[in-house]
Amino acid sequence: MADPNRFKMINWYPPMIGAGIRVIDTTADFTSITVEMKLRWWNRNIVGTQFGGSLYMMCDPFFMAILMMNLGKDYIVWDKAASIQFLKPGRRHVRAVFHIPQDEIARIKAQADNNGKCEPEFDVDVLDTEGTRIARVHKVLYVRRKPDKA
């Protein structure tokens, strides 16, 4: 598994910089990633709240990244579907914590190995600095073992 602190290099990815999104913490076993997005003039929408596209973007790659890092190079992990439900206007900085427990990662691996594929589903809440739920994102991933090379 790669160094979780090295993953923070994603903070230098131009779309992340442009949206003001930052990975602020990862656990040593890379089962959790905490991401924040400060409300800035460049990521506000026309009514002065968090831009919906940025709220979704801050939730896009992280469940996939957790699985890729934990399953390793022998597995294909793709996003299959996603949806976002906007619950309240984001008028402050926001944060989301992405977590997949090790036992769930083991279950996904076993299901992919035994059934040829697995399509796990995850939800994450986007909270503001007061703990108010601003949005909820639902993700469906696709996981399968890479075919053996001949």
Image (cartoon, grey):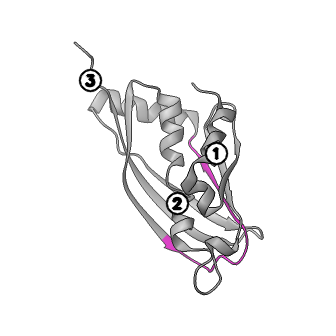
Nearer to us: label 3 or label 2: 2
Nearer to us: label 1 or label 2: 2
Q: The disc labelled 2 sits on which kind of residue?
A: Met
Q: Which residue is mark 2?
A: 57
Instruction: Name the image quarter holding the C terminus.
Output: top left
Report crowding for label 2: few under 14, some 14 to 19, many 20 or more residues within 10 A (C-alpha). some
Local secondary structure at mark 1: strand
Q: Which residue is mark 1?
A: 33
Residue 87 within the segment the image draws in magenta? yes
Local secondary structure at mark 3: loop
Local secondary structure at mark 2: helix
Write the start and end of the magenta stretch as one range. Answer: 85-100
Instruction: Name the image quarter holding the N terminus.
Output: top right
Percent of width and height locating residue 78: 37, 43
- Which quadrant of the structure image shows residue 112? top left
Report crowding for label 1: few under 14, some 14 to 19, many 20 or more residues within 10 A (C-alpha). many
* Cα–Cα gap, marks 1 and 3: 29 Å
Comes first in the chain, label 3 or label 2? 2
Comes first in the chain, label 1 or label 3? 1
Q: Which residue is mark 3?
A: 147
* Cα–Cα gap, marks 3 and 2: 31 Å
Give me the residue at 44% from left, 55% from top: 139
Percent of width and height locating residue 119: 35, 45
139 in relation to 113, above or below: below
